[in-house]
């Protein structure tokens, strides 16, 4: 079954229906008596690469950055929390640390490995369901790849 979805209308409707509430305050994670500066880092850290040169080699209907902005704030929050959770679980799992630096709770470390792997394995499916124009419908390549001859048609 192939259904065309007006993504702009869908995104506008989702935005209106599921707008995530803004934080009214950020918890002070630094402890009592700390200065009044924000607890979390701002945008002064190194930025991630956008790989624009790669995306321009494909006739995409929109860039990954544009795709992100088509998502509702609730979905952006869901995916952002999953990415942060995946990174935190990866840190606690200790795979990147020497054995002497591992957390002491092996059961916790194992659970973190499971959570990290679960999130990593499920995030692609979640994104594919959100953007069939970018990733393609179930069992087929996206139209941009088929129309450009970059991918073979489904058998």
Image (cartoon, helix red, strand yellow):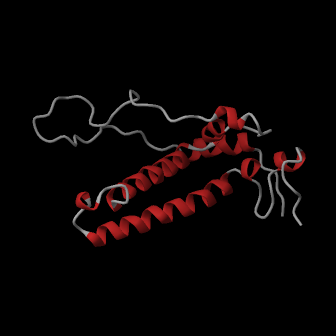
Residue that sits furthest to the left in the current view: 33
Q: Which of 54 and 34 is in front in this view?
A: 54
> 135 above or below 38?
below
Q: In which quarter of the image is the C terminus?
A: bottom right
Q: Nearer the viewer, residue 154 or 128?
A: 154
Residue at 87% in and 63% down: 154
> 17 above or below 43?
below
Residue at 59% in and 41% down: 16
Q: Where is residue 91 in the image (x, y as percent from the top left)?
A: 35, 54
Q: Quadrant of the N terminus?
A: bottom right
Q: Position of residue 141 (x, y in %)?
A: 80, 56
> 50 above or below 83?
above
> How many numbered circles are shown?
0
Q: Which of 7 and 61 is in front in this view?
A: 61
Residue at 39% in and 30% down: 45
Q: In this view, does 111 lie to the left or right of 57?
A: left
Q: Position of residue 89 (x, y in %)?
A: 38, 58
Residue at 29% in and 39% down: 26
Residue that sits furthest to the bottom in the current view: 107
Q: Quadrant of residue 22?
A: top left
Q: Is residue 72 left or right of residue 111?
A: right
Q: Is residue 38 left or right of residue 138?
A: left
Q: Which of 82 and 5 is in front in this view?
A: 82
């Amino acid at each position: 079954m192939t259904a065309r979805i007006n993504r702009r209308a869908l995104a506008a409707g989702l935005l209106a229906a599921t707008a995530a509430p803004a934080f009214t305050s950020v918890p002070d994670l630094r402890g009592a008596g700390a200065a009044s500066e924000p607890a979390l880092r701002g945008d002064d850290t190194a930025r991630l690469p956008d790989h624009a040169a790669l995306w321009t080699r494909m006739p995409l209907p929109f860039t990954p950055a544009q795709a992100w902005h088509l998502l509702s704030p609730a979905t952006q929050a869901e995916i952002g929390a999953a990415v942060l959770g995946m990174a935190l679980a990866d840190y606690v799992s200790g795979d990147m640390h020497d054995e002497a630096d591992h957390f002491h709770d092996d059961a916790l470390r194992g659970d973190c490995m499971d959570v990290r792997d679960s999130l990593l394995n499920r995030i692609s499916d979640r994104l594919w369901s959100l953007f069939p124009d970018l990733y393609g419908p179930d069992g087929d390549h996206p139209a941009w790849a088929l129309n450009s001859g970059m991918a073979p048609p489904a058998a």
